[in-house]
Image (cartoon, rainbow, N blue to C red):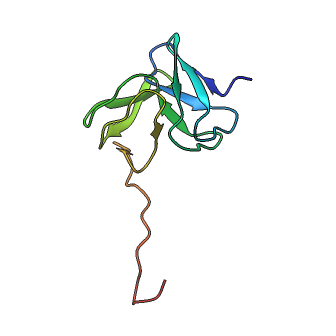
Amino acid sequence: MTQLILLHEDDNVLVVVSPIEAGDILTIGGGTVPAREGITVGHKVARHALKAGDKVIKYGAPIGSMTASAEPGEWVHMHNMKSDYIASHTRAVVGGKA
């Protein structure tokens, strides 16, 4: 069963097309790596090692920048990347109420 797809040959992330559970063996770049955590459909994983400051390439175009490193097969999302074009959504307590 395919869990990841490559949208464009220049992409440095893969897209999850079938749910990933922690421990699943992912085939990436001719090798395999175990998934460190569960990742839902539509999210991204690193195609190769990424470091803070690297551009995240999806659809063959930059969509953001890494804020922390990620190893191959690791989840790439708002906890380790940011959009270079729009402000990231944040949740903050306003007026002391959640």
Residue 48 is situated, as x and y percent measured from the top left of the image, at 40, 22
- In this view, the residue farthest toward the right is 1
For image coordinates 35% across by 25% down, the residue present is: 49
Residue 68 is situated, as x and y percent measured from the top left of the image, at 30, 42
Q: Which quarter shows the N terminus?
A: top right
Relative to 1, does residue 70 appear above or below in the rendering?
A: below
Relative to 68, does residue 4 appear above or below in the rendering?
A: above
For image coordinates 29% across by 30% down, the residue present is: 54
- In this view, the residue farthest toward the top is 30
- Quadrant of residue 7 within the rendered picture: top right
Relative depth, front residue between 54 and 69: 69
The reply, left or right, for residue 35 in relation to residue 67 is: right
For image coordinates 42% across by 64% down, the residue present is: 90
- In this view, the residue farthest toward the front is 23
For image coordinates 46% across by 35% down, the residue present is: 74
Q: Is residue 7 visible?
A: no
- Quadrant of residue 39 within the rendered picture: top right
The reply, left or right, for residue 2 in relation to residue 94 is: right
